[in-house]
Image (cartoon, rainbow, N blue to C red):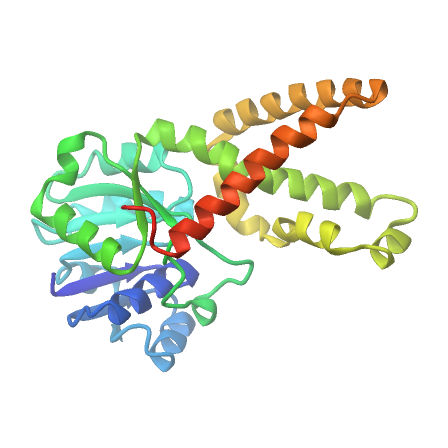
């Protein structure tokens, strides 16, 4: 792999470029983004040069689509005629079914869906960092297992290992059902909590008396609507299923609160939360195999 193209040099795309460099990638990294973003990415030494999509893809061994979901869906159909044969096209989109369906239509190049489970509230290439993916799950969503065995996919997976990402494999549909619960449901719960308190008659007093619990619980509410609009649009059914699951549990919890029998809920929730933290710590320490 000699030339990598980052289409969408923001937080994720910029971090992938920096991570590759830190892991020893010695080839060229080309960026496809707005003029302003390319200028900033060059100043920060995130990329080697900016280029048009056509110019960059003609040289690419790997095309990394890191823009918003709708942008990725718009770009994929354009790639067959401009990416050189044998290249690998992958993406970092937060939902996978629609993206992988579009990628399956490519004929001259291989498409491999991907989703790094990493991010920040901050956006843009200025927030990019080389260690963003280290110890974090990186979900790969091949349409068939053999797609992971091609030379291009093997090399890409080798670089994911080199940057410290923890690779996981799922079908696009499995991915979307999983992240609806692990990512999209937490976002909506945080948004709902912050929105509820914002409309409370004593919102200012609540904010003034807030402790770390409320601050932690509303962290995700800082996320930008521009990012989440595409996620909610392209994974609506799985998210509705997750919300239904939560709503049923919430109704039962409300009944148990009335009867004063919430001890088992706290115990079960505590075990799950502790397991999450042990798993996250193990991944950060490199104890979980990829």
Query: Does residue 2 sit above or below 45 in this rendering?
Result: above
Q: Residue at x 7, y 49 (%)?
A: 85
Total numbered badges shown on the rendered structure: 0
Residue depicted at 16% across the width and 45% down the height: 80
Which residue is more in the foreground, 289 or 173? Answer: 289
User: Relative to the observer, which residue lies in front, 224 or 209?
Assistant: 209
Give percent across and percent down for residue 36.
42, 73
Q: Is residue 51 visible?
A: no
Q: Is residue 112 left or right of residue 251?
A: left
Left or right: residue 39 versus residue 249 is left
Quarter of the image with the N terminus is bottom left
User: Going 36% across and 58% down the picture, which residue do you hit?
Assistant: 134
Percent x, y of residue 157: 20, 50
Asked if residue 53 is positioned above or below residue 43 in the image, the reply reads: above
**Which residue lies at the image location 45% right of the left edge and 52% below the top edge?**
281
- Which quadrant of the structure image shows residue 64? bottom left
Residue 201 in the image: x percent, y percent? Answer: 92, 45
Q: Quadrant of residue 16?
A: bottom left
- Describe residue 30's horizontal placement relative to residue 249 as left or right: left
Determine if residue 268 is in view: yes
């Amino acid at each position: 792999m000699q030339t990598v193209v980052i289409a969408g040099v923001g937080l994720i795309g910029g971090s992938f470029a920096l991570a590759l460099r830190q892991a020893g990638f010695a080839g060229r990294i080309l960026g496809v983004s707005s003029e302003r973003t390319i200028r900033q990415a060059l100043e920060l030494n995130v990329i080697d040069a900016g280029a048009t999509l056509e110019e960059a893809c003609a040289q690419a061994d790997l095309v990394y689509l890191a823009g918003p979901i709708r942008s990725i869906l718009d770009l994929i159909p354009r790639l067959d005629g401009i990416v050189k044969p044998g290249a690998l096209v992958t993406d970092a989109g937060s939902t996978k079914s629609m993206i992988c369906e579009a990628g399956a239509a490519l004929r001259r190049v291989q498409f491999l869906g991907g989703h790094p489970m990493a991010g920040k509230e901050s956006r843009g290439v200025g927030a990019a960092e080389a260690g963003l993916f280290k110890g974090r799950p990186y979900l790969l969503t091949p349409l068939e297992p053999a797609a992971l065995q091609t030379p291009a996919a093997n090399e890409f997976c080798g670089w994911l290992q080199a940057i410290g990402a923890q690779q996981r494999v799922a079908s696009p549909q499995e991915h979307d059902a999983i992240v609806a619960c692990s990512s999209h449901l937490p976002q909506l719960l945080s948004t709902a909590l912050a929105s509820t308190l914002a409309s409370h008659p004593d919102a200012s007093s609540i904010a003034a008396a807030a402790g770390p619990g409320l601050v932690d619980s509303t962290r995700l509410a800082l996320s930008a609507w521009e990012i989440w609009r595409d996620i909610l649009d392209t994974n609506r059914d799985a998210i509705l299923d997750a919300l239904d699951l939560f709503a049923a549990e919430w109704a039962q919890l409300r009944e148990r609160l009335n009867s004063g029998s919430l001890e088992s809920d706290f115990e079960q929730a505590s075990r799950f939360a502790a397991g999450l933290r042990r798993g996250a710590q193990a991944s950060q320490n490199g104890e979980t195999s990829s």
